[in-house]
Image (cartoon, grey):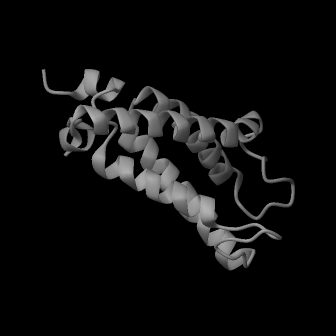
Amino acid sequence: MKNKFLAVNSIGTPADLTLLLIRIVFGYAFIIHGWSKILNPFHWMGADAQVPAFFQALAAISEFGGGIALILGLLTRLSSLGLFFTMIVAVYSHIFIYGHAFISREDGSYELPVIYVLLSLLFIVIGPGKFSLDKKIFGKK
């Protein structure tokens, strides 16, 4: 099971280069989103947040550390899994707690978290591509 989850398959150089570019941009976005959270990982939501500190820390690590891991292509499926669940919570919050629309110019929206969920799913299913540390570490010799 572990070998299958960490395995890296090449899907062709153009697609592998595309995955690399998506990983870099996606990872960089999460480093930026996670930076302020990782500076105060247990209380980034504020003093009266209803989310336990432990879960706030998991989200901070998932976003900041997951962003770094994506850029490097290191443990890509695992970091994408963390981002997937973090963004599922974000989508749920936007829809059911804040009542946001999918796209809105006035209020918040859940458009971007849905895109992040789908990109996370892409890397969980397909993997990082051949231009990754995962390929060097877990690829076939």
| Residue 17: x %, y % from top left | 35, 32
Left or right, 16 with reference to 45: left
Q: 39 and 104: which one is in front?
A: 104
In the rendered image, the quadrant that contains the C terminus is top left
In this rendering, position of residue 45 left or right of residue 70: right
Residue lying farthest to the right in this orientation: 47
Residue at image position (61%, 65%) is: 111
Task: Quadrant for residue 97, please give it.
Answer: bottom right
Please report the residue visible at 49 percent of the width from the left and 58 percent of the height from the top: 117
Q: Is residue 28 left or right of residue 24?
A: right
Residue 58: x percent and y percent? 59, 47
In front of the other: 59 or 128: 128
Toward the front, the furthest residue is 14
Residue lying farthest to the left in this orientation: 141
* Residue 72 higher or lower than 115, as above or below: above
Q: Tally the numbered discs.
A: 0
Query: Which of these two is toward me, 100 or 41?
Result: 100
Horizontal and vertical percent position of residue 131 = 33, 26
Res 98 → quadrant: bottom right
Looking at the image, can residue 85 be seen? Answer: no
Residue 27 percent location from the top left of the image: 54, 37
* Residue at x-position 21% and y-position 40%: 11
Residue 58 seen by the camera: yes
